[in-house]
Image (cartoon, rainbow, N blue to C red):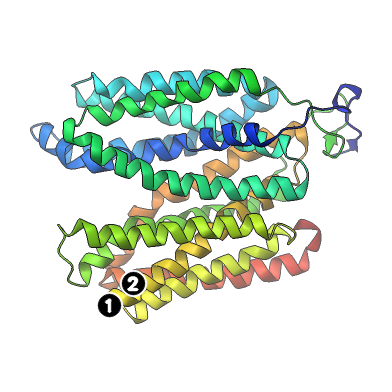
Amino acid sequence: MTETLPPPEARATRRAGVWQGILLLAGSCMPVLGSVLITPVLPQLSEHFADVAGSDILVPMIVAIPALIIAIFAPFAGQVVDRVGRKTLLIIAMFAYAIVGTAPAWLEALPAILFSRVLVGVCEAAIMTVCTTLIVDYFHEPARRNKYLGLQTVTTTLAATVFIALGGALGVGGWHTPFWVYAISIVIAIPMIISLWEPKGDPSDKHAAVGAKVKVPWRSIWVKLLVTLFGGFTFYVLIIETSYLVVGTGVPANDTATIGIVAAAASLATAIGGFVFARVSKLAPGRLLPIAFGLQALGMILIWVFPGFVGIIVGAILAGFGSGLLLPSMLTWVVASTRFEERGRVTGWWNTAFYLGQFLTPILIGVLAAAVGGLPIAVGIVGVTAAVMAVLVGVGIRRTPAEV
């Protein structure tokens, strides 16, 4: 764990600007594209593959599989990032993403489509790991780094709304059509080739001693990764369940306008939370975590206590704002203090924890709702758990101030 000054070639580094930030934020939207673009055409897919055995489970997996694959493969992407380099992996993954992402546009067999989605998840694991690592590498000053990590949440949240609308519009032409949007990664990759560079570290970075074997710093990150796993779960609870909560108040399931307004309000609150994080970057990210979990808890408990339409709107907005504050706070808390030589692997493991939490969300909420007799009660129990996490994290940070 000995630290030393960066090597001589790292003493003078290129300074990233707004253009590099835009490219990395655009790349960060690719996993969002993978998870939401085709949700509007799922009913068409279900109808098309109705005769395929197990299609009622396999068709939804077209959306769910990439998140699971990110959770599995992100650590391997982190290994490549630290040992081979950042830029090369990113460019290869962006071009490969266009190929495997558009494959269902001309595929007809469900197993082949599912396999292409597995490959999409592998590409997304690489893209998300590299983009996040490069944001920390390029914008090493705390204020600029936190600004772009906050904007990462804002951008991806707003992009999710745009991609859902785009998928719905293109779906009018048939379920194959939205898959062509994945080719946009090529449009982003070309300027990446020109404008991004392989970082060598910065004088302000922590570095390992020359020749030292650098391992994943499990001792300092394992608790943080567990918090991230839980945070990934709470982050996605209302993203997935808000529409069902609204329908539970008596709103017809085909009243997509009303359901969409509530979901959009919560999504906008998440984006605002990310923007606020970027504006309050002078605060230690770890100290924002109890506030973020507390806001999530307040919103979810409000839905439990007041399960009517107004209660769900207010609760979803409060929890959404907390989620927007939570995501960049967790990421900065875990990644920002790492050494340059281990940053890719730590970022990979962070992605694993977060996306595993995302993948487990519908499973855990389904089991919990069945056990307690209703979705609002289940959401409220998650809120109580988030409140407990807020207290635990707050107490833990007070005892280890150097870790914030």
Q: Residue at x 72, y 35 (%)?
A: 137
Q: Looking at the rendering, in which quadrant would you find the N terminus?
A: top right
Identify the mark at residue 308; answer none if there is no mark: 1
* Residue 277 appears anywhere in the view: yes
Kind of residue sitting beneath label 1: Gly
Asked which quadrant contains residue 283, the reply is bottom right
Left or right of 404 in this view: 236:
left
Residue at image x 66%, y 33%? Answer: 134
Q: Label 2 neighbourhood size at 10 Å, few (<14), some (14-19), many (20+)?
A: many
Q: Which residue is mark 2?
A: 312
**Residue 88, position in %: x, y?**
61, 18
How far is the residue under mark 1 from the one under mark 2?
6 Å
Q: Position of residue 321 (x, y in %)?
A: 50, 64
As drawn, 184 above or below 22: above
Q: Judge from the rendering whether residue 157 lies leftward or rightward of residue 392; answer left or right.
A: left
Looking at the image, the residue that sits furthest to the front is: 18
153 and 57: which one is in front? 153
